[in-house]
Amino acid sequence: MPETAKKSELHAVPPIALRRRIVDHLMTAASVVTVILVLAPLFAIFAYLVYRGVGSINWAFLTQTPKPVGETGGGMANAVVGSALILAIASVIGVPLGIGAGIYLAEFGRNRFGDVIRFTADVLNGVPSIVIGIVAYAIVVLSQRHFSALAGGVALAIMMIPTITRTTEEMLLLVPQALREAAYGLGIPRWRTTLSITLRAATSGVITGIMLAFARVAGETAPLLFTAFGNQFWNLRINQPTAALSLQIFNYAISPYDEWHRQAWAGALVLIVLIVSAVAAVRVAVRRGTFGAA
Amino acid sequence: MADPALQRSDTPFSQPAETKLVSRAGPVPVVASFFARGKSGETADRIFKIIILLCGVAVLATLALIVYELVLRSGPSWRTFGLKFFAASEWDPVNEQFGALPFVYGTLVSSLLALFIAVPLSIGVAVFTTEMCPIPLRGPLSFFVELLAAIPSVVYGLWAIFVLVPILSNYAEPFLAKTLGWTGFFDGPPYGISMLAAGIILAIMIIPIISSITREVLMVVPRHQREAALALGATRWEMIRVGVLRNARAGIVGGIILGLGRALGETMAVTMVIGNRPEISKSLFAPGYTMASVLANEFSEATGDVYLSALIEIGLALFLVTIVVNALARLLVWTVTRGQPASTHA
């Protein structure tokens, strides 16, 4: 290619230059078109979601449990609470393990074993969510003998761990080595340095990682299909089948009833709003330094 | 006297400096005092390291557990059907005859179709954001594209059922049938619910992955490559083609394969629009079935050991394929962003 470029410069033949200029403009136009084609579905999805969702959300939707087929009204309140329960279980299991593994990789993992764990986390990140659902089924559901919120939580926790681990590691590595050395110089033990100084300095990054993981699993449906299973009624016990917003959206979307379709859209809007506001709330809290004060 | 440091922090010379600091800042006195025992926190450090190591090992153990459970529980199916499992195409739970070929076919075709649509679009977007777009637009543009990644799969499915599928069956599929029907790929009744719908929704879902990795890779191409091409009289597009894209090839391919990995394992959106019929058909208008979809639909209803383990064997196959695909992708991305792949093996 550099040769053609040189040649055309030497001879300066207008037709070739024109052709090249046209190609240049065509390719620019083509990439603008790709941007439009990619953004179009995004806006279409959000616009349609708001259009169908807002009309369907009402007080009953947010406070009642589902009504049987044929009756209008009812809502997904139990699914919202169920989702919160499952996500809470997932966070309780996944966040400490993920952060711990991240600390290991950053502070002790500059060796072969660390590389093995790093690679494992990356592999785990790519495992299809439905496969993780199978494993949670095999471990939790089969031993408990029924579907449960706990099983759903375990499945989602497994999905959270790799993201949290890798972001925690990255963020800890960004903390200047001098900070650690200063702490050691003051005679502070290593565990204390790591927890109160290194980790504290990286707090906002680590929390961003947690939120990434949270947002990723909050809308997951596949791993809950045969772990949390779904439920038409209220349930707050972790060893019972539990409704989840994403499951309810799925079940209603593939149903033949208009009333349920309407509720599926409302549920989808609620789900997205909850995910976005959870992420935003934590962002704001971190920025204000709520977690910062010693 | 479990914690001298806590109780006598007012007598500075009687205690080693570090225990004093511990007690002053300790958020939970009992825990802090436990850790502060010992002369210079050696015991505490050892315990801390063990706890942290256990967390690291837990990551390893999780993957091992996944492999163990999948291999163990797919045993009955493996012993009954052997390798024929992936070559046979009948799926008959009543007579316990299981062949996974239609699912493998559906997964491959829908994912490849998604790549076919998504690759040019993602590379176009990445090239536009890194090379052409006015700088103030760059941030918002990549934000919007990555927003696509934040939408849950089930919401994509919902949108696909009520918006994409009607568009396909009313406009796109009749049009394709008229213009390209002779190829045999666009044949049959335009129901909308089809392999084509699954491919399109998958494409929308993997575009943010491919384009964000492509963008990352394009940005690490050294500036002087671009300047050299421009200095030789290249137009902007020639500069992008010769100076940028050619240098970033391996990384872009890595991004594409990573997108493939996501497409292979994607479940919900595909299940909602692909039609869920275990048939192999040349036409993209025909319904199909994927490995992930059959798990989603039939796993909780599977009765009988062989049925269940046949499904788990499909899960195992899906797991192995995605691992290979992801490992390959990461290696390729690393070759561009972190120097030679040899250093990543160590």
Image: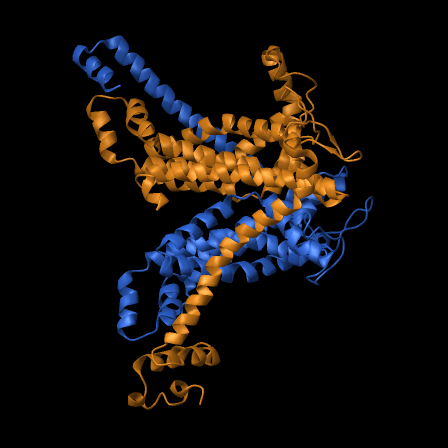
Query: x, y percentage for residue B262?
Result: 52, 38
Relative to A93, residue A67 above or below: above
Towards the viewer: B260 or A246: B260
Residue found at x 40% / y 81%:
B37
Query: x, y percentage for residue B38?
Result: 38, 81
Q: Which chain is blue?
A: A
Instruction: Give the total number of marks visible in the rendering.
Output: 0
Relative to B35, residue A87 above or below: above
Which quadrant of the structure image shows residue A204?
A: bottom left
Q: If the image is split into quadrants, where does the N terminus of chain B sit?
A: bottom left
Q: In the displayed structure, does residue A105 sit left or right of residue B14?
A: right
Residue found at x 58% / y 29%:
B110
Q: In the displayed structure, does residue B63 sit left or right of residue B227?
A: right
Which quadrant of the structure image shows residue A294?
A: bottom left
Residue A77 appearing in the image: no
Which residue is situated farthest in the front direction here? B79
Relative to B90, residue A136 above or below: below
Which residue is situated farthest in the left direction here? A10
Q: In the displayed structure, does residue A206 sit left or right of residue A4?
A: right
Residue found at x 44% / y 31%:
B122
Residue B209 appearing in the image: yes
Residue found at x 44% / y 42%:
B143
- Tell me the shade of chain B: orange
Towards the viewer: B284 or A17: B284
Q: How is the image coloured?
A: by chain
Query: x, y percentage for residue B149?
Result: 51, 41
Query: x, y percentage for residue B55?
Result: 48, 61
Relative to B124, residue B179 above or below: above
